[in-house]
Image (spheres, rainbow, N blue to C red):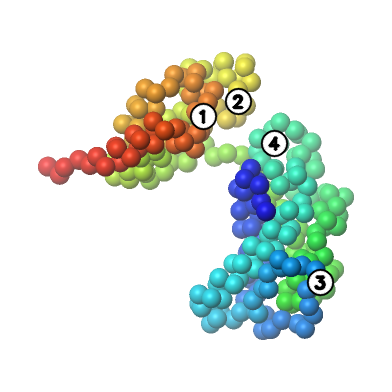
């Protein structure tokens, strides 16, 4: 079971794992006779290897997705807590993480990570010919772990590159958008002094239509926005914002 606070990182991890697993699965002909470890009641039986022709079959695709999800869950939950929750913010707050989880991953760190991988994972990979033998496990998992670390610790993009095609509150995609500073500039100094936010988060923005942008500033002061309503998810969770979005989302301009 994946905790809610780790869900986003898990999905990133699963994406990083899926590439090499799908690629290797697509070129195998059939699984070996070896069985997976006993005692794994909830183990997912992976698909027999697929061919390019079979890949078009919907059932094979579903089975492969379930297989990847099983492997990702087994591996991800075996990782240390600080790696499961790794982020740009975490590295900024604890610089030692950037040394522990760097590229390339230090050998002592890598050895610890690989030693904690459940036997069910290596056994499954061997059973379905995704590994020739156990000595190849680092070759499969090291690039994937590196990709995961890079993805979770990358610097947030500048706001100009985060532009959406629809308002992030009412979801109308046919009207002009403006950018709303989630932490208003007028309170940046106070936000830093009071420790509400880190400096690198101050320029976070949401892309809103003019009507929603004005509404947000009507329902909360700049300080309230900075302290409590500093993300799109938090804003969209407010009852008044939900009601507003439902109403304004039905408003459309008539053609002239």
Name the N-terminal-most of marks 4 and 2.
4
Of residue 131 and residue 171, the one placed in the foreground of this image is 171
Look at mark 4 in the image and give the residue it sits on. 90
Name the N-terminal-most of marks 1 and 2.
2
Look at mark 2 in the image and give the residue it sits on. 197
Look at mark 1 in the image and give the residue it sits on. 230
Which dot marks residue 247? none
Mark 4 secondary-structure assignment: helix
Name the N-terminal-most of marks 3 and 4.
3
Quadrant for the C terminus in the image: top left
Look at mark 3 in the image and give the residue it sits on. 38
Answer whether labels 1 and 2 touch (C-beta < 8 Å). yes
Mark 2 secondary-structure assignment: loop
Cα separation between marks 1 and 2: 10 Å
Q: Is residue 136 in view?
A: no
Residue 128 % position (x, y): 72, 76
Q: Is residue 35 above or below residue 188?
A: below
Residue drawn at point x = 57 percent, y = 30 percent = 201
Question: Quadrant of the rendered structure where residue 175 is?
Answer: top left
């Amino acid at each position: 079971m994946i905790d809610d606070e780790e869900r986003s990182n898990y999905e990133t991890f699963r994406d990083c794992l899926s590439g090499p697993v799908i690629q290797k699965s697509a070129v195998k002909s059939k699984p070996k006779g070896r069985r997976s470890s006993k005692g794994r009641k909830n183990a997912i039986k992976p698909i027999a290897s697929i061919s390019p022709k079979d890949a078009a079959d919907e059932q094979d695709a579903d089975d492969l997705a379930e297989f990847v999800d099983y492997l990702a869950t087994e591996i991800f939950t075996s990782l240390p807590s600080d790696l499961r929750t790794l982020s740009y913010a975490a590295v900024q707050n604890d610089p030692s993480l950037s040394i522990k989880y760097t590229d390339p991953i230090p050998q002592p760190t890598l050895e610890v990570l690989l030693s904690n991988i459940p036997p069910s994972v290596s056994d499954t990979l061997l059973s379905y010919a995704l590994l020739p033998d156990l000595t190849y496990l680092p070759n499969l998992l090291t690039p994937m772990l590196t990709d995961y670390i890079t993805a979770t610790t990358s610097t947030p993009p500048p706001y100009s590159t985060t532009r959406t095609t629809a308002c992030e509150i009412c979801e109308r995609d046919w009207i002009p958008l403006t950018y709303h500073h989630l932490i208003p500039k007028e309170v940046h100094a106070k936000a830093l002094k009071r420790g509400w936010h880190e400096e690198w988060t101050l320029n976070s923005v949401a892309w809103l239509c003019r009507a929603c942008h004005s509404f947000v500033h009507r329902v909360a002061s700049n300080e309230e926005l900075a302290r409590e309503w500093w993300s799109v998810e938090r804003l969209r969770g407010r009852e008044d914002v939900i009601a507003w979005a439902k109403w304004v989302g039905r408003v459309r301009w008539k053609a002239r």
